Amino acid sequence: MTRDFDQATWDDALAAHVASRAPEWLAEDLGHECDWTTLATVPAAATASLAVVARRDGVIAGLPAAAIVARAVDPALSFVAALAEGARVERGAAVATLSGPTRSILTAERTVLNLLGRTCGVATGTARLVEAVAGTRCRVYDTRKTVPGWRLLDKYAVRVGGGWNHRHGLHDAVLIKDNHRAALAERGIDAAGAVRLAREFLAATLPPQRVARMVVEIEIDRLEDLEPVLTERPDVVLLDNMQRDDLAAAVAVRDRLNADVALEASGGIRPDTIRAVAATGVDRGSSGWPTHDAPWLDVALDW
């Protein structure tokens, strides 16, 4: 396969995204006023250095984002990571140190910890899936089942956890799903015709260099649809909620007719099910579990 989806990484664009969101996140705590508790109880001149500590074992992700949020509260705050992104952390170990004016530390505390709890939780959940398919050909991909406004960070955390990013949104790939196919069926267009229609539209609408990067994927839920679809050479065929015997049969059909097409399994993929799915020989398992079901990593700020 020559095409794949864009992959999230920590870069200037993601840093700018976090910086643009930080005031909104902080406003949830501060409103249009201030941290009355801290102002009432902590002297303005007080300083401190506190450790961000993991309360559970997990995978660390989001430290650069946490540093940006801390600086958004007060440029005088120093957020120093104790571990690298993607590192394993054991319960009780320090993840980072937050130092500077005590008032600013206490004001930043909950937002910084919420961010890290979410990103580390997604990375830890993804790592569980990746570990479950070790030794197979199957890659773990995420989905668009993310918190609104948090998709870029969620997808970044998936990558830190060892997973792969599916499309970032409706704008960067073609994925013909069941409801698209239902609408097309009213016009007498089948699954193979849907792929052909999409290819023709892209070629007529986008410049060639964009077309060359655009992934075209189609979802099917019946094994009999696979063979005609393969003749149209989609980049990926999504096998939705198929039984394992059908997944294995689909791999055999694909290998015989068009080995360049990637097969992606989806539906109910969790840590306890993904190994059996991977054993069928599919190339990918896409799962929303890390972003909608995996628990946050419990992190705290210790004096």
Image: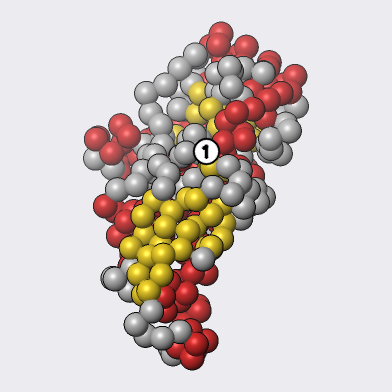
Residue of label 1: 88
Q: Position of residue 33 (x, y in %)?
A: 44, 90
Q: Quadrant of residue 46?
A: bottom left
Q: Is residue 99 visible?
A: yes
In the image, residue 222 above or below residue 135: below
Q: Position of residue 241 (x, y in %)?
A: 71, 35
| 3 relative to 229 in the view: left or right | left
In the image, residue 105 above or below residue 196: below
Q: Which residue is at 72% across, 31% downward?
A: 273
Q: Which residue is at 52% across, 69% downward?
A: 110
Q: Position of residue 2 (x, y in %)?
A: 37, 23
> Which residue is at the front of the view, 159 or 182?
159
Q: Position of residue 244 (x, y in %)?
A: 73, 23
Q: Residues within 10 Å of mark 1 (few under 14, many from 20)?
A: some
Name which residue type carries label 1.
Arg
Q: Which residue is at 36% across, 55% downward?
A: 80
| 151 relative to 279 in the view: left or right | left
> Which residue is at the front of the view, 182 or 94?
94
